[in-house]
Amino acid sequence: MMNQIIVKNLFNDIPEKSEQEFLDILLQKDSIKVERIVSRGHSTPENFWFDQDKNEFVLLISGYAGITFDDGDKINLKPGDYLIIPAHKKHRVEFTDPVEKTIWLTIYY
């Protein structure tokens, strides 16, 4: 059992530049995982589709991004937008803001 309160900030401890997206697991317990992902001009490699075993709640905190689904649907996200991607719904990140850090909060459940 956890007896202490932990306070952190989503905007702290982010590398200034990175060749790959920065991924930080904020919480993982039982069947829930919460991640912070930081992108800057990153996208999913060509011909690759994410196909996760769990539902995914995605909240865009800053920047902007485009997500494409294997059925052709495309969604552009701005800060404050969120979506829920059902388990096994194939998707990919087409683009992220090349200038401002795109910060995502994802919850897998």
Image: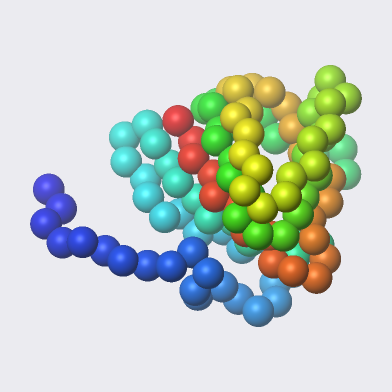
- For image coordinates 63% across by 28% down, the residue present is 85
Position of residue 83 in the picture relative to residue 24 (left or right): right
Count how many numbered circles sit on residues in the image: 0
Q: Quadrant of residue 32?
A: top left
The x, y position of residue 84, in whole percent, is 60, 30
- For image coordinates 50% across by 59% down, the residue present is 24
In this picture, is 22 found above or below 44?
below
Position of residue 10 in the picture relative to residue 6 (left or right): right
The x, y position of residue 6, in whole percent, is 26, 63
Q: Toward the viewer: 92 or 11? A: 11
Q: Toward the viewer: 89 or 59? A: 59
- For image coordinates 73% across by 27% down, the residue present is 90
Q: Quadrant of residue 38?
A: bottom right
Q: Quadrant of residue 93?
A: top right
Coloring scheme of the render? Answer: rainbow
- Residue 107 in sight in this render: yes
Q: Toward the viewer: 31 or 4? A: 4
The x, y position of residue 87, in whole percent, is 59, 23
- For image coordinates 82% across by 66% down, the residue present is 98
Residue positioned most to the front = 80
In this picture, is 16 found above or below 51?
below
Position of residue 75 in the picture relative to residue 59 (left or right): right
- Residue 39 in sight in this render: no
Q: Quadrant of the C terminus?
A: top left
The x, y position of residue 41, in whole percent, is 81, 62
